[in-house]
Amino acid sequence: MANFYFLKKELLDVKILGIDPGYAIVGYGAIVFAANKFQPLCYGAIQTEANLPFYDRLSTIYKDMNELLEKVRPDAMAVEKLYFQNNHKTAIDVAQARGVILLSAQNFDVPIFEYTPLQVKTVVTGYGKAKKIQVMDMTKRLLSLEKMPKLDDTSDALAIAICHAQACGSNLRLSMLKRSCAYNVL
């Protein structure tokens, strides 16, 4: 529970940056959480060109993450934990991109919190087996967006940011998050 110290300070305006890691597309979504309300700050995606050598793609992600962190100055960064069943090559490449993202946050002294897809679904929709469209709909409603961003990665990042705000906002929410950890299955 000690990791959640920054939200215990009267729940003042807290900027949370949600990240959906990848090496082709890194979705991001920054929100402000205050008085149990969410406000979108900025969202989008860092995209790398498929024809670039892999290490150049990692360099692009690192540079763009640094620019994003400089611009947003978040109080916390929430990142999706990796979960892969089949393609180990993709998992390794995404893990490397994720490492670059985490390094960038570490260099900016931004506390990092990780959530599984099951935890995000549980916290955002109340149901751990919710479909992607249900998560997107709740995210849209919670942020009062007219429409969701085109890229799923960006929508996922916003949901991850909401998950962190919700999970850390109260002991009840925190216990719900811990309970979903025990059933870490998609």
Image (cartoon, rainbow, N blue to C red):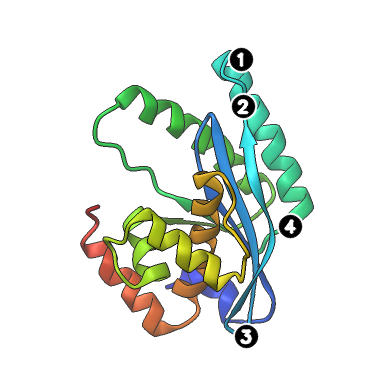
Provide the residue designation for mark 2.
48
Provide the residue designation for mark 4.
73
Residue at coordinates 54% horizontally, 29% vertically from top-left?
24
Residue 145 lies in quadrant: bottom right
Provide the residue designation for mark 3.
35
Of the numbered discs 3 and 1, the one sitting upstream in the chain is 3
Res. 116 visible in picture: no
The answer to whether the residues at label 3 and label 1 have Cβ atoms under 8 Å apart is no
Q: What residue type is labelled 2?
A: Thr
| SS label for mark 4 | loop
| SS label for mark 3 | loop
Q: Residue 123: horizontal and vertical position, in percent?
A: 39, 70
Res. 172 visible in picture: yes
Q: What residue type is labelled 1?
A: Leu
| SS label for mark 1 | loop
Residue at coordinates 52% horizontally, 66% vertically from top-left?
162
Q: Distance between the residues labelled 3 and 1?
A: 44 Å
Residue 52 numbered tag? 1
The answer to whether the residues at label 4 and label 2 have Cβ atoms under 8 Å apart is no
Residue 185 lies in quadrant: bottom left
The answer to whether the residues at label 4 and label 3 have Cβ atoms under 8 Å apart is no
Of the numbered discs 1 and 4, the one sitting upstream in the chain is 1
The answer to whether the residues at label 1 and label 2 have Cβ atoms under 8 Å apart is yes
Q: Distance between the residues labelled 1 and 2?
A: 8 Å
